[in-house]
Image (cartoon, rainbow, N blue to C red):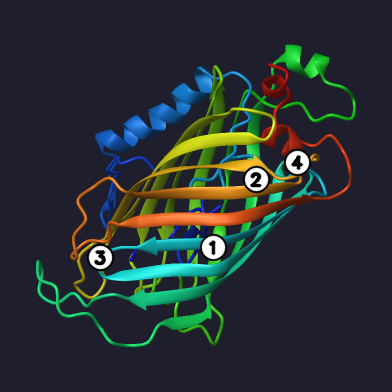
Amino acid sequence: MMNLQRESGLACVGKSAESVMHIPLTYYVRSGVHWNREWLYFCRLLVVIALLSGVAHAQAGPPFRTDDPETPGNRQWEINFGWLGDRNSTEGSYSIPDFDINYGLGNRIQLKYELPIALHEVVANTGEIGKNTPPASGPLDLDLGESLLGVKWRFYEHIPASIASDTEDDETPDPNFSFSTYPQLSIKYPTTRTSQDGLVGGPQFLLPLEANARIGRFRVDGEAGYWFTDRSVPQSWIRGVIVGREFSKKTEVYIELYDQQDANRVNGIPKKREATLGLGGRHSLNRTNTVLLLLMAGRSFQKIAPVNAQPNWIGYAGVQLLLGPKQKSRQVERSIPDNISDR
């Protein structure tokens, strides 16, 4: 089974517990890296998003698999408690729950620590290719999942002069587009027997690139990255896009395309892939917009069969807490933008 998320989309376990578009990306080969036409299209899409954008308030991250360049804000906490699920024809992986803790160090840096309680369910064993053996009778595996450590750095943002001049001294102006990188390291505990994706190897490292923008009233986020692993776990590409908007002061809804694909085989096992379409959003539960309900559900938009990892369903349900010194921070702005609430 492929890893659940994005991070920060869903925040991930194993390679990404988190957790893109259904676009086949380039394969890594020992002779070098070859960029195919679809990969170039995806990179061009991120550039077009930036060039056509207005003010960027788009927020990826939980409950989505795709992440974005936004950070909590200086000395601000973003804490997510989520219940994640990912099930295909042969197995299921769940976090019950997933603890995702983020802290803003300045306005451009985010520190992350994530730890799931991982449950792995074997629905059936896959024997010969194209055939399915009777369901396995083994017990469920319940244990601490792999912890995820990350540092997000928004290395570029463009703020139009007109927006900067209209911003008060104690406010952080929002860019009309921005870019970030979000390196993350997945580490298993000595007692870990299972992870959220059912695979347990050595340390794994994710190196992604994120971009976000606004096109009219719609918010757009894009992410692409690569998981570097040891020999016991396949390396993989991730890529994702979410599009949506805020419908009121308290509610925002997005649709997500996400794709994760193995880049190599391990022990002769065929490469696996998850290409999913999800719908989700956030809804504020209090007046100060510091407690949010997070929901997302989806499934594969490709053929589902016992021999592949395409999920019958994926899901996220949780709560987000926004804590820290009272200030007009980017975190509040991106959750409930003023220009939307005044319409």
Structural distance between the alpha carbons of marks 2 and 1: 27 Å
Q: Amino acid at mark 1?
A: Trp
Residue that appears at 57% across and 47% down: 61
Pointer 2 residue: 153
Q: Secondary structure at mark 1?
A: strand
Whether the residues at callouts 1 and 4 have beta carbons within 8 Å, the answer is no
Q: Earlier in the sequence, mark 2 or mark 1?
A: 1
Pointer 4 residue: 289
Q: Secondary structure at mark 4?
A: loop
- In the image, 274: left or right of 306? right
Residue that appears at 22% across and 80% down: 135
Pointer 3 residue: 89
Q: Secondary structure at mark 3?
A: loop
**In the depicted structure, whether residue 155 falls above or below residue 57:** below
Counting other residues with Cα less than 10 Å from the Cα at mark 1, is it few (<14), some (14-19), or many (20 or more)? many
Whether the residues at callouts 2 and 1 have beta carbons within 8 Å, the answer is no
- In the image, 43: left or right of 167? left
